[in-house]
Structure formats: C-alpha cells, structure tokens
Image (cartoon, grey):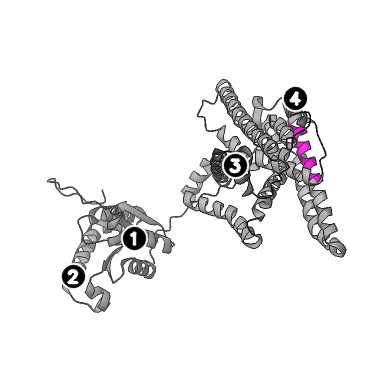
Amino acid sequence: MIGLGFIVEIFLCKPSPGGVASGLIPGRLSGDELYVAIGIIGATVMPHNLYLHSSLVQSRDVARRRETVAEACRSNLIDSAIALNGAFLVNAAILIVAAAAFWTHGIQVTELQQAPVLLEHVLGSRAARVIFAVALLCAGQSSTITGTLAGQITMEGFVNFHIRPWARRLITRLAAILPAVVVILMAGEASVYRLLIFSQVVLSLQLPFAVVPLVRFTGSRQKMGPFASRFWVHGLAWSVAAVLIGLNGKLLYEQIADWGARAGSNGWMVTAMVAPIAVALGGLLLWLIFRKEKPIEPILAVTPDEVVAGARAAKRQVRRIGAALEVKATDASIVAEAAALARTHEADLVLIHIVEGVGGQWYGPQTGDYESRNDEAYLQGVANSLKRELTPHGVSDVRAVLGFGDVPRQIMRIAVEQNLDLLVLGSHGHGGLEQLMYGRTIPTVRRALRIPVLVVRAEAAPASDSPQEPLTE
C-alpha cells in the first residue's frame, strides 16, 4: 500500500489528457519533476512515522502467546491500512483539486499565501478559503503530534534518554521552528513555499535509513520468529526500498551536478565539499543493507544476580548521617529515620537546625535572642537523648550543630563542614502559596549536594499511653 501511494502520488502532479487514471503512467523523472516527486514521498511516509507505528504495535497489552500476538499484529495491520490509505486519498484529492483548479486555468502557484485567494477566485466561494485554512491547521497539528510522539519514542526507546515532557517538547519544537524562522527572516515570506518542499525532500532522503533497518528487522527469523515477513512480502519491501534509494540517489546526483554548474569555475570546490558527505552516507546505507546479523544480546546491561552480588560485596561508606530538624512536633519522623539509619550503619549522627529569625540572619552565631537559646537547648536535648539510646548499638557520637540565616545555604554549609555521607530532610508537602511563603529547601539542597538526600514525610508522632520504647528496637 505504501508503494502504491508512492507511485500514484508521484504522477498526480498535473492532469493528463487521459484523465486521472492515466497519471499512473510514469512520466519524466528528472529535474523539477523528480524534486517535487521526492518531496511528496517524504511528506507522505515521513521517517519518524515508521518509528511511531513500530511503537504503537506494542501498545496493546496482550498475553505473550502466538495466537494473541498474531491477533494484535492483524489489528495493527488494519489500523495502518486505514491510516495510510486515508492519507493517500486525502493527498490524492488535494493534488487532483489543485491540478483541476489551477493548472487547467493556467495558474501557477509559487507561494503558499496564493492558495486561499486563488481558491476563492477560481471556485467562487469564500468557503474554499475557510476549508483550506482548517485543513492546513489540522495538517499542522497532525504533523506536530506525530513528530512529538516519535521523538519521545526515539529518545526513550532507542537512546534511553529520559527528560521532562515539557522540556522534550520545547527542545524538539525549537529545533524544528528555529531553522524555518531564520530562513524566513533572511529570504522573506516568499521562501516559505520553497522551504516547505525542501523540508519534505530532506525527509525523503532520510527515509532509506529508517526503511532498510525496518525491512531487515521484520524479515529476520532470529528476531521475529514465526512473525517474520513472508518471502513475497520481504521481496516486495526490498523492491520498494530499492526504488526509493534509486530515486533519492538520482536526485542527489542531479543536485550536486547542478550546484557545480551554477558555481562555474568554482564548481570543483562545491563537488569536493558535498561529494564526500554523499559518499559517506551511501557507505552507511550499504553497511545497513549488508551488515551481518549478530546474535540477540540481552537488553539489560547487567543481570539482577550481578546487581545483588555487587550489593553484597560493596562496602557501605556511610560514616556520618545528618538530620535537619525544625523544632516542631514533626521532627519525630525525621529523628526516627535518622536514628534507624545510624544504628544500621553504626554511623555518627549530626542533628542540624537553622535559626532563621532576625537575630540569626543579622548577627549569626553572635546572637543571643530568645529563639536561638531555645532552639539550641532543644537540639542539644534531642542529641543527648539519642546518644544514650544509640551508644550501645555502635553509634559513637551524636552531636548538635546550629546554623544561622538562610536555611538551604546553611544546611549545605554544615553538610560540607561535617563531612556528611547522608542527609535526612523532612517534607511537609507544601505547594502553591505555602511553597512561595516557606521556600523550596529540598530541591535546592538536593541539587547542590553530592551526597544522598533522604526525604521523609514530616509528621507528628501519634500520642500513646503505652510505656516508651527505644527508637532502635
């Protein structure tokens, strides 16, 4: 179906005396005709759509049995057939209408901005302009959605590169928009029409590098097992790939020769710069075609047994643990986690509190106001109690360290000065206005420090009438 779409759309560029069907007969494939034909191929089968459809077939959660996998493949075949034939019919309709409306009236469209005005003039209806605008908008949205999805699939599935969705969309959209904006600013709006065709030609030139691995992969018994392409399907796929590679190669040869002719006496310089790139890409394509298939290797770079064995043999280097307290009832959950970790690792424990009042901000350690005195007494009291409980379990030191001023900055300073190997922070789940009022301590500290930061939910311990039990049991 894809190959049929190639042939039909290539030769529907202008009406023929024999009607639309006579457009199936190949005409002259060189010069501008070949350039436009290659652009139509790139616009219809865009290489990133191949990756998208390859991923969509895995979106069905089915049992890994031959019958259910075969059913999923048949469903995906139906989906692809509807989508590709729908695209073929829409593109064919656009070409037929354009040829009937413009070519038969001797009108040549050289700018995209001409289309809506000419449609209204030729067809005599303002609805034609509205329909064209809506169709253009829908085409742009469709291209953007498929491009974004294919970019996500490629980055996460092939490159194993995971970033925030908004950052990925921003990067990919800027990468697509900026070159177009630069060209329009330099060459004016009249260049949009040529830039649009050129972008589709570039897509077509990239297409073999997506089609060849796909054909090889789907025809491999080693990878696909009983679902590998049949012999006649595999042969048809290679035939389409060969036609595509041949057309792209012919266009590339003609373009290099044309650039060299336009450069006149300096044509050899153009050839010397462009020809090696074309040869290198051709070599890469040949390597993809004739590359020897290797045995399937495990997807995981390491096995679970290797990870567990490495964890057993690893030496835990946690010698000193820090816990940032706030002089609130919610410190109980932070102290509980820090004490448990200190006992497990037989590590020293450093209790941290930052005095962030006016006195602490302006006078630092020299302040002696009511807040700083109370906070120091509180922190030292917690440290003394923990030391009595943790000393029998191998914890040699529990100390209290007070900081003054900006909370994130002081926590980071104390963590460095005390040579902490792990830091425990409490999270209250602030958001919106509360986050604006209280600040963002955890993200700031976590980004700046090079040690593990454990974030626990800061909650007050429930009241209990039972006898107190040690934290370490």
Which amino acid type is shown beneath numbered disc 1?
Arg
Residue closer to the observer: 376 or 7: 7
The first of marks 3 and 1 along the sequence is 3
Q: For the residues marked 4 and 3, what is the alpha-carbon distance in whole angstroms? A: 48 Å
Q: Amino acid at mark 2?
A: Glu
SS type, badge 1:
loop
| Earlier sequence position, callout 1 versus callout 2 | 2
User: Nearer the observer, disc 2 or disc 4?
Assistant: 4
Residue 258: image x %, image y %? 82, 54
Mark 3–mark 1 contact, CB under 8 Å?
no
First-in-chain label (4 vs 3): 3
Q: Residues within 10 Å of mark 4 (few under 14, many from 20)?
A: few
Instruction: State which region is magenta.
Output: 237-250
- Measured in 3D between alpha carbons, the distance from the residue under mark 2 to the one under mark 4, in whole angstroms, is 84 Å
Residue labelled with disc 3: 120
Secondary structure found at label 3: helix
Residue where numbered disc 2 is placed: 371
Using the rendered image of the protein, determine whether residue 340 is visible from the camera's viewpoint. no
Q: Quadrant of the N terminus?
A: top right
Q: Amino acid at mark 4?
A: Trp
**Front position among marks 1 and 2:** 1
Q: Main secondary structure of the magenta part?
A: helix
Q: CA distance from mark 2 to mark 3?
A: 78 Å
- Residue denoted by label 4: 232
Reading the chain from its start, which is encountered first: label 2 or label 4?
Answer: 4
Determine which residue is flagged by label 1: 440
Bin the neighbour count of mark 1 within 10 Å (Cα to Cα): few under 14, some 14-19, many 20 and up: some
1 or 4: mark nearer the eye: 4
Mark toward the viewer: 2 or 3: 3
